[in-house]
Image: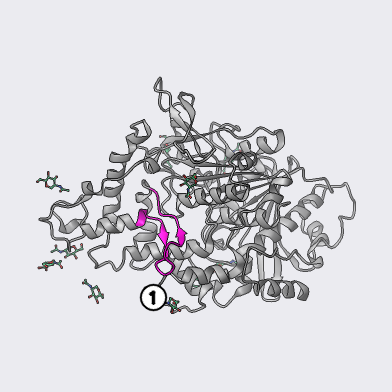
Amino acid sequence: MARFAVAVVGAAIVLASQAVALPSPPSWFWLRHKPKSPGKPLECDRASFESILPAGATLEQVTAVPLNGSYGEGTADIPYPTNPTGLPALCAVTVRVESSPTSSYRFGLFLPDEWKGKFLAIGNGGFAGGINWLDMAPGPHYGMATVSNDLGHNSSVTNLTWALHNPEAQSDFGWRAQHGCIVLGKELTRAYYGGKRIHYSYYNGCSTGGRQGLRELQEFPDSFDGALIGAPAWWTSHLNNYVTKVGLYNLPVNDTKHIPTTLMPVIAAEVVRQCDGVDGVTDGIVSSPELCTLDFSKLLCNATIPSNITTLSNTTSPSCLNPDQIQTAKNVYSDYYSSIDPGKFLYTGLTLSSEDQWFILLGGTEPSPFGVGYERNFLFGDPTWDWRTYNDTIIAYAEQTDPGRSTAAKFDIHPFKRRGGKMLMYHGLADGLVPTKGSEYYYNQTVDVFGGRLPAVTDFFRMFLIPGMQHCWTTPVDAPWNIAGAFQSGVMGSDVWSVPGFKDKRHDALLALVDWVEKGHPVDEIVATTWKSPTNYTSGVLRQRPLCPWPLKAVYDGVGDVDEAGRWLVRWRAFTDVE
Ligand SMILES: *[C@@H]1O[C@H](CO)[C@@H](O)[C@H](O)[C@H]1NC(C)=O
Ligand SMILES: *[C@@H]1O[C@H](CO)[C@@H](O)[C@H](O)[C@H]1NC(C)=O
Ligand SMILES: *[C@@H]1O[C@H](CO)[C@@H](O)[C@H](O)[C@H]1NC(C)=O
Ligand SMILES: *[C@@H]1O[C@H](CO)[C@@H](O)[C@H](O)[C@H]1NC(C)=O
Ligand SMILES: *[C@@H]1O[C@H](CO)[C@@H](O)[C@H](O)[C@H]1NC(C)=O
Ligand SMILES: *[C@@H]1O[C@H](CO)[C@@H](O)[C@H](O)[C@H]1NC(C)=O
Ligand SMILES: *[C@@H]1O[C@H](CO)[C@@H](O)[C@H](O)[C@H]1NC(C)=O
Ligand SMILES: *[C@@H]1O[C@H](CO)[C@@H](O)[C@H](O)[C@H]1NC(C)=O
Ligand SMILES: *[C@@H]1O[C@H](CO)[C@@H](O)[C@H](O)[C@H]1NC(C)=O
Ligand SMILES: CC(=O)N[C@H]1CO[C@H](CO)[C@@H](O)[C@@H]1O
């Protein structure tokens, strides 16, 4: 154990986080010994797992779950209290691993009776400290052994106080718990199935989960053959300060510039009015926000309305903004550049059509806990740090220190590509939490590292932007959104997996990825689905549309049913500066 602690301390003093590889697990980490009878599967019982777990790991639970059973920790799992139901028969295992003398993480493993020789790791969301049992549920339906971990703490998505003065817990959050549960999870999987090989390993995560997946494949390219990365919160050192900055655009609440949450849908509706048709189809969905130049004057209140009246209840003409509020909206859409180091790009703005989710970052009386919690508990170690003192030097400091080394900004992933790794990234164009253009920026940076040529990247890494989809799931504008990404099954029901009614590689992005990895078929399109009631599949399919690998996009052929995926063609986006 001591050796591991030393290695981690050694890593923590390296400030330039991109340059040095993270330490590998120490020797005590590996299984104590091979199972007693090689070739013979283990029983799903405590004795079997206890006999092989390494010294630093403790067995918590082993449960044989019958067909159509349910498993999870219920409300004891603060961020993931919903237990999946309707599971295939499997062995559920929970293990706690000491990651340093003062820290530990827990992980859960589903080992399906009908195993197809595959392994799947699942991500978390926000700062959620808990095993994501609900998101693990699809894995065994695909025949995959599936792992998820609690990132080394026990908390809700927005509670970051566990990180205060706790660099070991920060490292578990940053990369260590995720990597450790993959290494040990694979060992246990092989042992459980009698020493059989794992033929393919996959990843599925969104938001923080997207970050976890990128972090893992950047540092440990052998972990996955395929990774499905949704709306990644990859640029921790920038993003978690950016969200404070965005919050400050709209504060204090008694300022004339403040946009109350009641006006956000008003802006959203005006954006749809002006930007919907720009993509060629008037359907209430803004599919090409980058081609729309919003005329803000259409949102401006007439001069007769006093500019200090900002709430709906005070105005006679409520569906409008004062000039200061217009400026706030412009700030939110603008990319963030440093005021201290002029011209230095710090983050992309939110896209047109994200307004229905602005309440997350702009709706409070102080900036989001994703920002202030990060600054107080990770960055400054000062629970009294005053967000009013935020300034643009903070990002440079965060970049240098990168607490927990959680930032996933190592764009050179040649080792992942060389071993045959494939990655699908996706991001909702109506995301109001993690800016969509940040994924585009990530993709561009990767293209640069690969010589500035798109084909050098598209042959192993493709990105799909999903018009009208918010952060990770669902839609306020009846846009097709479901591609079986992380969290997407869970919000449809505790027993849902894949895309209900369309459990195939054309509609399910994980199955598309599997087809690319295992059969060599590149993913040229994914058909997204929505229902009459967007998260209720029994309400009936409303629309399906193909998504294309960025920068390609689907265009309606002008004939037939616009809500039918087959009526859409693939076209080049209006770039002239890429191949
Ligand atoms: C599966 O379990 C649920 C309860 O969780 C039950 O309502 C349902 O009838 C079961 N289905 C089958 C096929 O046994
Ligand atoms: C996490 O905290 C909750 C609420 O305090 C508690 O019920 C639960 O047992 C804790 N979980 C673990 C693994 O410590
Ligand atoms: C945050 O978590 C800490 C324990 O880590 C707990 O004491 C505190 O009550 C939590 N705060 C909220 C707002 O839930
Ligand atoms: C806003 O509120 C703060 C404190 O609540 C007060 O000091 C300030 O004067 C107010 N500003 C305006 C413009 O009313
Ligand atoms: C401003 O006044 C004009 C003329 O009265 C009216 O047509 C228009 O709708 C008003 N605009 C807003 C945003 O209230
Ligand atoms: C708005 O400003 C006007 C004129 O400056 C002032 O008379 C009025 O009291 C202010 N209203 C509010 C709600 O602050
Ligand atoms: C910016 O904020 C940091 C952290 O609160 C503080 O140490 C620094 O003095 C501030 N810099 C300026 C120029 O205000
Ligand atoms: C990505 O690159 C394309 C092509 O050069 C460019 O048009 C686009 O603005 C870039 N996007 C971002 C977010 O950097
Ligand atoms: C889902 O839709 C069906 C059919 O419209 C309806 O009967 C059912 O109550 C809905 N379920 C929920 C949870 O809203
Ligand atoms: C003059 C007036 O009606 N003021 C109201 C404006 O709206 C706020 C918030 O709803 C109320 O608190 C004020 O009384």
Q: Residue at x 57, y 72 (%)?
A: 401
Residue at 40%, 43% (x, y): give it.
290
Q: Point out the residue furthest to the left here.
A: 304
Residue at the far top: name it. Answer: 559
State left or right for residue 417 relative to residue 524.
right
Ligand 7 has an atom within 8 Å of the beta carbon of the residue at disc 1: yes
Q: Is residue 119 among the parts visible in the rendering? A: no
10 Å neighbourhood of mark 1: few (<14), some, or many (≥20)?
few
Could you tell whether 194 is left or right of 460 in the image? right
- Quadrant for the N terminus, please: bottom right
In which quadrant of this rendering is ligand 2 seen? bottom right
Q: In the figure, residue 98 lies in which quadrant?
A: bottom right
- The answer to which quarter of the image holds residue 104 is bottom right
Q: Front-most of 445 and 53?
A: 445
Q: Position of residue 134 (x, y in %)?
A: 57, 50
Q: Residue 106 in the image: state x and y as whole percent.
A: 66, 63
Residue 122: image location, x then y, percent: 62, 51
- The answer to whether residue 365 is magenta is no
| Front residue (pair 195, 273) | 273
Any part of residue 458 in sight: yes
Residue 54 appears left or right of 480? right
Residue on which the image places disc 1: 389
Residue range (magenta): 332-351
